[in-house]
Amino acid sequence: MKLLVSVSALSLGGAAFAADDAAQEATNDQGQLEQIVVTAQKVSQNLQDVPLAVSAISAEKVNQLGIRDAKDLTGLAPNVTIVQGTTNANAAVISIRGIPTPATETFGLDTANGLYIDGVFIARSGGSAIDVTDIERIEVLRGPQGTLFGRNTTGGGIAFISRAPSKEFRLAAEGGYGNFNAFNGRITLDPGEFAGISTSFTYSHRQRNGTVDNLNEPDDSRDPGAINTDSFRVAAKADLGGTGSIQYIFDWSRTDSSPINFQLTNTASGAANPPVTIGGVPVRTTQQAPVAPFLAGVNFLDPRCAALAAPTRVWRQQVCNDINSRSTDKSWGHNLQVQNDFDAFHIKSTTGYRQWNNDSVTDLDGIGAFTAKAFSNASLFNGMPTGLLQFIPSIPEAFRPFIAASPVPNVQQNLFDTNNKRRHKQFSQEVEIGNETDTLDWVVGGFYFWEKGSEDNPQNSGFVLDTNTIFTGNFGPLGPGFVAANPARYRLVQTQSVLRYTASAESTAVYGQATFYPGGRDSGLRLTAGGRYTWDTKSMIRVQNGAAPLATPEQGRAKYSRFTWNLMVGYDVSDDVNVYGRIATGYRSGGFNAQDPAVAGVLPSFRPENVTSYELGLKSELFDRRLRFNLAGYHNVYNDLALAVPVTTGQPGTFATAVTNAGKVTYTGVEAELLAVLSDNFTLEGNIGYVDIKFKEFLAGNPVALGQPLVNTAEFATPGYTSPLTANVAMNAQFPLSDNGMRLTSRVSFAYEDGKYSFSNTLASPLNEVLRGENRNIVDAQVAIDRIPLAGGEGFIRAWVKNLTDENNLVRAIDFGQLGYGGGYFADPRTYGLTVGVKF
């Protein structure tokens, strides 16, 4: 029987430091690197033998770094970046090899990077509950995984594998404190095996105040960046006799959060953006509303808000938002795994069901409430002199003095806020059968997936109108007179719009893969081939996309099918070095554009995304397995790459994004990973990744002359949510403090990311260039004393800090196009805390 009690803390960003020994990557008694076993190909293999780019994060490193969700993986694998979600704390934009997941959780566009928890595909990142998962291992697969993992993995995949319930008694408790009043607690109980059943129960709580002070919110626990999460998980496992087992997992989570603050960074003057000429065809660019001169003349209800309304790229620690963004996420799920090993094969069944509910209110202008002059047709001529009003036939002579004496009415408004209600549920079933012999590994399987989601999204916005353009454009020679007498040039058009739809998807697939070892496993040569056929059905019903419900709901239904395949060859150059080559294809399902109002009565759609990937790699363990060095180079060719771009709706005061197929795009990159045991006291780890993206064809843009075909706007395209260069280096140290095992451990890491664009078409996003995020240079550190002898057990104490140099980087942005402004989101400031714990 084992008794384990520990106390640990999550960092402000959600990372926990558990009590397990994790000062450095696991080594054996001879100081050599331990083997890491992964299941990236549905069979257990040594990481170094897998002929594709996989980064494995062991339980030791998970505990050391306190990894609790996908957002904590930034910097741990090359060409992988992760950005916090904007409307809820659980979601994130995950980019692998330059391919990001959707920036917003819309049910029309699928992910491009698969997220898996214990074998269950998580269709929407906001619906995951990794926080309460007792993680044993994480596998980051880079490159298309279209054969074994299927659709919607054109960038790659991330798999979280949890620890199975212990057959022996085990108790773990965690808790800690950090700045911003961050408190975290967690308890795990494994009662041991009873009647052949082993169980594990986990409860987790974490909270913190906001990282930005909203002057209009007196409660710090509701400031931007605040979070309060409660999670529960139960797992039960029973042996079925012989080699069989059945395991059931239930998880439940609720997160109440105030999403990170949207900060106004840029406003437009309203000056005309001239069209550009591409191939002799004039293409219209987005015209922006004159927000800059408008804001200069408004009256803020709270005088403190006036000074905080000026756009700036400098991170603000104080804001004056009129609407306090809030989000509540509830998710729960079931996971049932049944497996058995027979002489001729082994079989595994994984059944999953999940639900996710999200309710959010989001401020999307970053300023306080104000009063301003309102626009309406009835008040257009208010305040004009009677000498000019006499030329307006529609105004009777008797009313002219009254109109001339009437002021332009005021309105209390803001620029943009939204209220969103999302509901999602999914079911999946997978069965795989396989076996391993001296000369052949094989696996075949079948997969079924179903999901249904709905969104109810009211939006309130104010569109700034330059009324001088009305007078100069419609009143001929009288125009200059009206312009000169105009009592309120910039006026606000109040706009209310609602997006309401329901979407569903169904997918069925069969797959198989085999690896042949000519001459046996010791021959050094491995030949792999695999294929998968997928059938997808997508449907959507949109009942409202504007101020009023549609008279006739817009419906769409589409079917897609694809065969994806891969070929791989691996060869052991020596006992310590092997090389591999891989050709693989992938596919992301098409779908429907919920927001795009392109043609009334028609639900716009987009085509499936396809990729062919070519990869060469080297994996090595040198100097008596004290140095691990892996290298990969790849060239990915995407056709019909699915990208979200802002669209001009034709309705003043509205903003929407639509998914478009960008045509042909190539991603060429290189990645390297290193792990070295320098001595008994020091280990060094690092990685670097670079990707070069070239748009060959991007059919987009709106021709000035209607009826002309779309043109190739590739020269104006930018890769969204992609850092061309990423790098990370970390030094781990340990020093014995006594003969009974007590030691001092430390870790210092440095991570670099190139700045990112947030949109992919500069013609539709006129602020795209100026809203590009800054390069990031992040230093994290920790120091600990662990294995402190206690009566019947041991303890530890650990101090940690993230973003040691307190860099305040713009990491994500929104260009609101015709609304005339843009802004963004900044990464967390410096966070730190203290952790203590014991185990028995």
Image (tube, grey):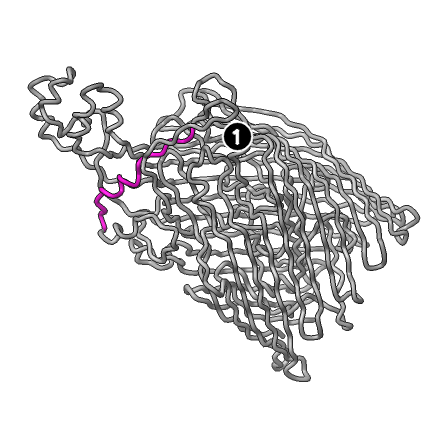
Quick check: 479 above or below 770? above
Considering depth in this image, is 373 or 446 the residue closer to the camera?
373
Residue under the point 58% across and 46% down = 95
Q: Position of residue 290 (x, y in %)?
A: 30, 36
Location of residue 225 in the rendering, given as x and y in whole percent from the top left corner: 42, 55
The residue nearer to you, when weighing 789 against 735, is: 735
Helix, strand or loop at label 1? It is loop
Q: Say what amino acid the circle numbered 1 marks.
A: Thr
Residue 287 counted in the magenta span? yes
Q: Quadrant of residue 550?
A: top left
In the picture as drawn, the residue positioned furthest to the right comes out as 519
Residue at the extreme bottom of the image, as rendered = 739
Q: Quadrant of residue 375?
A: top left
| Start-end of magenta stretch | 285-302
Seen in the picture, residue 830 relative to 247 is either above or below; the reply is below
The quadrant the N terminus occupies is: bottom right
Image coordinates of residue 374 in percent, x first then y, are 22, 34
Q: Which residue is mark 1?
A: 713
Q: Residue furthest top?
A: 393
Please name the residue shown 44% across and 18% down the image: 706
- Measured as percent of width and height from the top left, residue 817 is found at 40, 35
- Residue occupying the point 27% across, 40% down: 293
Q: As drawn, is 624 to the left or to the right of 520?
A: left
Residue 699 colored magenta? no
**Mark 1 Cα-neighbour bin, 10 Å: few <14, some 14–19, many ≥20:** many
